[in-house]
Each structure stands twice: as structure tokens, then as C-alpha cells.
Image (cartoon, helix red, strand yellow):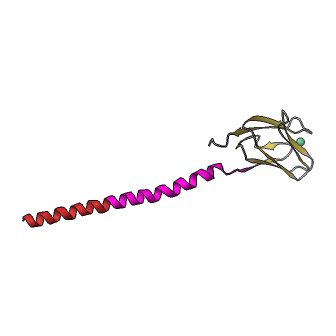
Amino acid sequence: MTVVRAWSKRALLSAILVAGTLGSASARATGVPSGTQAAPDSKKPAIVTITIDQATFSPGETTVHVGDTIQFVNKDAFDHTSTGTHEEWRVVMPAGKSGKVVMKKAGSFDYYCEFHPNMTGHVTVKPASLP
Ligand SMILES: [Cu+2]
């Protein structure tokens, strides 16, 4: 009786040790990939498209991050510009063409078209570190 009881205790102990080893190994395996992937993805610059159709910027309200590019695609048969209200940028889009601007400063910016001053839009530029 005492011999059997001693063996079963040892078997139980080794089962706990195996379970403990497996547990820590799987935790380590899942921890490494998520830590190395998350950081570069969140800082990758993006290209955001704003379409101009029938003398309207769409969407009229856009949020990007510092370093992102805004591409204005002019679908109209006449020229437009995207000009910052305080001349932070100026992009000319001939009929059917597109133009790009890289957002370098964080802030809140209104813009308009120099040929059609009632065409307006707004861009919020967040610091690159913020989500
Ligand atoms: Cu215009």
C-alpha cells in the first residue's frame, strides 16, 4: 500500500512539471511575434485619397498622420487646386489628373480650391506616434 501511494505521488508531481513547462513555452512563443510586428506597422506612412467630383472634395473631412501622403484625384473635366488656407500647401490638379502632398506638420488645416473658392475641405494631421 505505501509503495503504491509513493509511486502515484511521483507520477502526479511529474505531470505538474510537464504542464508547467508547456505553459511557459507557449506563453513565450506567442509573446515574441506580436512584440516585433506591432511597432513597424503603426508607423508606416499611408496614402489617403481625396476625390474631386463635380467641384466637391470627397471626403470633405480627413484625418491622417504626420508623414502620410494625401492624393487628390480630379475626376472633373476642368482644373482644381488644393490650397491650404494659410498656404501650408498648394497642389494643382489639371482636368482628369491627380496631385499629391505629404503632410509634414501636425495640426488642423482648412483648404480650398483657388478656382472655385466655395470648394473647401478640412484635414486633421495627428502626430505620427498617436493612433
Ligand atoms: Cu476647383
Span highlighted in magenta in the image: 20-48
The quadrant of the rendered image in which ligand 1 is seen is: top right
In the picture, which quadrant includes the N terminus?
A: bottom left
Q: Is residue 25 left or right of residue 93?
A: left
Q: Is residue 74 visible?
A: no
Residue at point 43% right, 57% down?
28
Residue at point 47% right, 55% down?
31
The picture places residue 85, in percent across and down from the top left corner, at: 84, 33
In the picture, which quadrant includes the C terminus?
A: top right
Q: Examine the image and state in which quarter residue 54 appears.
A: top right
Q: Examine the image and state in which quarter residue 117 appears.
A: top right
Question: Does the magenta-highlighted stretch encompass residue 126?
Answer: no
Question: Does the magenta-highlighted stretch encompass residue 32?
Answer: yes
Q: Is residue 71 left or right of residue 79?
A: left
The picture places residue 96, in percent across and down from the top left corner, at: 89, 53
Residue at point 71% right, 50% down?
46
Q: Which residue is more in the foreground, 70 or 97?
A: 70
